[in-house]
Amino acid sequence: MSKTFAFYTLGCKLNFAESSSIGKTLTQLGFSKANANQCPDICVINTCTVTDTADKKCRQTINKVRKMYPNTYLVVTGCYAQLSANSIAQMEGVDKVLGANDKFILPQHLQTQNNQHVVSDNRKMTPFHRSCSAEDRTRHFLKVQDGCDYFCTYCAIPYARGRSRNDSVANLVQQAQEVAQNGGKEIILTGVNIGDFGKSTGETCLQLLQALDQVEGIERFRISSIEPNLLTDQIIDFVATSQRFAPHFHIPLQAGSDEVLQLMHRRYDTALFAHKIHLIKQKMPHAFIGVDVIVGMRGETDPLFEESYQFIASLPISELHVFSYSERAGTAALKIPYKVSPQVKKERSHTLLTLSDQKKQAFYQSQIGTTRHVLWESTKKNGFMSGFTENYIKVKQPYQAHLINTLTTHTLTQDMLDYEI
């Protein structure tokens, strides 16, 4: 009888893609996925460390799994394991700790199930490991890049994930073709710093997008997130005229103040960011633009936050993803003297989330009466199914099972809009 396994994955879509790929490898080696009511022989927790809240959630998950399955062989891996291996190894019930890149040798370690902890030095160039996962049958997350060379002052991810590296265009096209052959309709490109694609292979991000655009059978590609300084005008022009890339951008701003951007060691200023936003809207007025913002960075005084707010309010963006600054051990931001209180961070988050709600509703309303293509998903809620247009508007209609993973064309009405505000 084969041994059973279960994954608990925390954090980003990149983690989910990697867990999926490791799970497939385990299955090929004769392991089987545990059923919902079954105690697995092996539990793997793939962790995140982007904030201190993420770290806390990781510890809670370890304790929860240990209580649920006291006799399971418990493996903790991922970014939090990379940076806090010793403290995790001392937690009760943890049998093995594998670093962020060492998770890919998990199958070999499970053959022996010893208690050796393995955390490789990510300062050295580590290999790229392919990963692709499916979500809701319609969307697939394709890992195209890993690691980051930027070392922003607030961020620990370069220390956890290592240097920037990527797969080749040819290999990624092949993976996309396999997704199409298996019935996948949409692929989301994932990575730590996607715009930096090409460091390993001498290729460019634009070359990758152009090659993927030729893959028959995939209806849509989306770029999960891309740095504003790496989102070239040529990439924007390409998406505006491409066959398959959606008019949907996710661009990290992090702060709308040049002074704070300098404290963060970001590689652009507000003028460049505004140029990118306005160029997208000039080429694709219907494009959805999501923007990441961090509040409460060390050094962000009240006047600097107000400057940031006014800048963001002036931009024709569609939605904000707001994060509170979280202190990470070993990062350069800890040397910045001015510290923002938790209460002020909370107030600033609320202020920006309110602005985000206003912008999202305004964008949704602007699209009423336009004709869009909707890819329907399998989730059923209150008798309705939902799907997304090419420009990322969530819509709903009465549930019809035969429409799952199909594209249909609609003129958007108020009743179709599915707000998540």
Image (spheres, grey):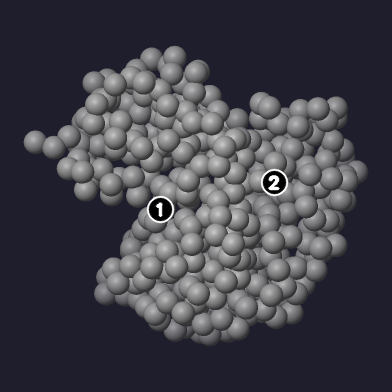
Please provide percent x and percent y for residue 323.
Answer: 66, 43
Q: Position of residue 301 (x, y in %)?
A: 87, 38
Image location (x, y in percent) of residue 253: 73, 54
- Residue 195 in view: yes
Q: Quadrant of the C terminus?
A: bottom right
Q: Along the line of sight, which residue is nearer the eye, 379 or 419?
A: 379
> Sequence order check: which comes first, mark 1 or mark 2?
1
Q: Residues within 10 Å of mark 1 (few under 14, many from 20)?
A: many
Q: Is residue 414 visible?
A: no
Choose top left, top right, bottom left or bottom right for residue 247: bottom right
Please state which amino acid type lies under the numbered disc 2. Answer: Tyr
Rendered-image quadrant of the N terminus: top left
Dot 2: what SS?
Answer: loop
The numbered disc on residue 150 is 2
Image quadrant assignment for residue 248: bottom right
Q: From the viewer's side, name the closer residue of 350 and 15.
A: 15
With respect to residue 171, does 44 lie above or below? above
Q: Which mark is residue 327?
A: none
Query: Which amino acid type is marked by label 1?
Result: Ser
Residue position for label 1: 131
Q: Residue at x 84, y 45 (%)?
A: 262
Q: Is residue 350 above or below residue 37?
A: below
- In this picture, is 51 found above or below 201? above
| Residue at the (79%, 44%) spot, across then down | 265
